[in-house]
Structure formats: structure tokens, C-alpha cells
Amino acid sequence: MRRIVVIDAPSNLGLRPPTEGTVPGCYKLAGALREQRLVQRLEAYEGGVVVVPPRYDRGDWREGDGVFNAEAIATYTCKLADRIEHHVRAGDFPVVLGGDCSIQLGASLALRRIGRYGLAVIDGSADFRHPGNSTRVGAAGGEELAIATGRGQADLTNLEGLQPYVRDEDVRVLGIRDYDEERAELAELKITNATVGAIREWGAEELAGAVLQVLEVPVTEGFWVHLDADVLDPSVMPAVDSPDPGGLMPDELGPLLRTLVRSERCVGFNLTIYDPDLDPDGSCAALLADLLQAAFAQP
């Protein structure tokens, strides 16, 4: 049985500020999940904290300047990749607690160093904004899938000369809203995606099983699972930066997540975007901890 190793990656560098003069609170995610005794409940080993990211400061950044905090995100991505690569090569199963969605780049870079890996994205939005489809490029937390697949500025897409970190055909996007504007482009690029409506039509466990049949093919050496808390409906998960209606319910996310992370070909997992500042009673943290405990519990 693989060792689960919990690693904190408390970066909020990839999000826009909630309001002028404030910073995104998702850097507190790991602490809130630890307060729920997640490490003990997963029977996991302690992986510590990836070096604390630089201070959140967009300086004089303006729309049209590219991705803000790009240099800091690039540096942090490489440091996180070092930690993840070490554990994957050792045969451990890293569970990385973010942070915003840009921490997924650390996982993608780490796995690209090792070989060819797939990526299962469970997210309320595709996070596929890039200069080819938007004039609002700036927040890497809404662009990380585009960056990971090689779209965007070279100081983020081509770290260590390894662009792209993951190939389009090795990505599966699950749980985006039925009205997501990026679905058409994903389909054109043959990036397989399933909306909330499709998951309900197929059944979460059945659809995850079908996705596994593709992610487990020998052409890749395994796959990573990226979970954004905003895939859940805001009626149960309001503590995110974009609480858009029409999301999954816990009893739908549960079997989807469980099926994926229990695969022998799954090599790691990260959780992002939950913001403890928006969860004063801790109920959202408790829900996420319960979902993760159930997903990783031995059958």
C-alpha cells in the first residue's frame, strides 16, 4: 500500500484580490483542513510545507500586462515540483493542499520531468483562459490548464524547456458547469470534458470508470487528480472565489473522486480554492475533510 504524504502548498499568487486592498484567503486552506485532523484521518505521513510563497503583491500590474505574479509563480512551481517529484519517484502518494489552482502547475511540471502523465481535472470551470481566447489574461488560477498544456507566456508554459507539461489528449475535465463558455474550444482541441449535467446523466461512478479506462492506458505512466472546491454547488460550498450555481452535490462528487484516486495508476492529488475566510463556522472545511476521508478510505 502506498504511503499518503500530505504537503502544504499555501500559495494564493494566482488569484485576483477579492476586493481592493485585500488578498485571497485560500492560502489558509491547508491549515483549516489540518484543523479537521485530515492527516490523521487519512492515516497519512507528514510532508511539511513547501517554502512559503512570496508576498502577494500585484504592484502596478494592469490588464494587458500578462499574468501577474508570474515570476513568483514560476519560482514556486519549481519548488513545489521538486517536492512532488521526490515523493512520486519514491512511490509515495502526495496529497497537496493549496492554495489556488496555480499549484497544479507544480504537479504537472514534476510529472513531466519523470515522463508522460495524464491529468484528471475536477473543477467548476475549465481554467482554460489564454491569450488566444481572452483579453483578460492575468490570474494564473483561472488559466492553469491552458498553461499546463502550453498556452500562454513562455516564462510559465516552458519552465525547464518542458512545454507542454501535459498533452491535450491526456487531459480529462470533469464537473464544469453546463453553461461553461470554454466547452466549445475544449471539444475542438479534443480535450474530453463532462459537465455536471453529463455526470448526472451517466452517473458519477459510471462516468469515472469510463474516464479511468482512458487515463489508465499504457501510453501514459499514470495520472494526477486536481480538485477545485468550486466544483461543488454553492449551496454546500459557498467558501470559494467563484460560487457559481449548478455545481455537483457531495453525493455526486464523492464517488467520482473515490473512483479516480483509488486507481493504482493515480500518482497524486491536490485540493485548491477553498477559502477559510468565507467559512466562519468551519462547515465547508468539515465537508471537504469528510469527502477526502471517504475517497481515500481503504475499501
Image (cartoon, helix red, strand yellow):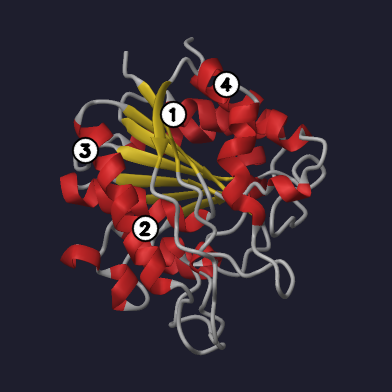
| Residue drawn 37% across the image and 35% down it | 268
**Disc 4 versus disc 1: nearer the observer:** 4
What is the distance, in whole Å, between disc 4 and disc 1 at their CAs?
A: 11 Å
**Disc 2 versus disc 1: nearer the observer:** 2
Circles 3 and 2: CB distance less than 8 Å?
A: no
What is the distance, in whole Å, between disc 2 and disc 1 at their CAs?
A: 25 Å
Type of the residue with mark 1 = Val
Which of the numbered marks, if any, corresponds to residue 76?
2
Name the residue that disc number 4 marks: 293
**Disc 4 versus disc 2: nearer the observer:** 2
Name the residue that disc number 3 marks: 221
Q: Residues within 10 Å of mark 1 (few under 14, many from 20)?
A: many
Secondary structure of the residue carrying numbered label 2: helix
- The first of marks 4 and 1 along the sequence is 1
Q: How crowded is mark 4: few (under 14 residues within 10 Å), some or many (20 or more)?
A: some
Regarding residue 203, the answer to whether it shows in the image is no
Type of the residue with mark 3 = Glu
What is the distance, in whole Å, between disc 4 and disc 2 at their CAs?
A: 28 Å
Name the residue that disc number 1 marks: 261
Residue 297, image x, y percentages:
51, 15
Which of the numbered marks, if any, corresponds to residue 290?
none
Residue 202 higher or lower than 80, as above or below: above
For residue 206, side relative to residue 210 (left or right): right
Type of the residue with mark 4 = Gln
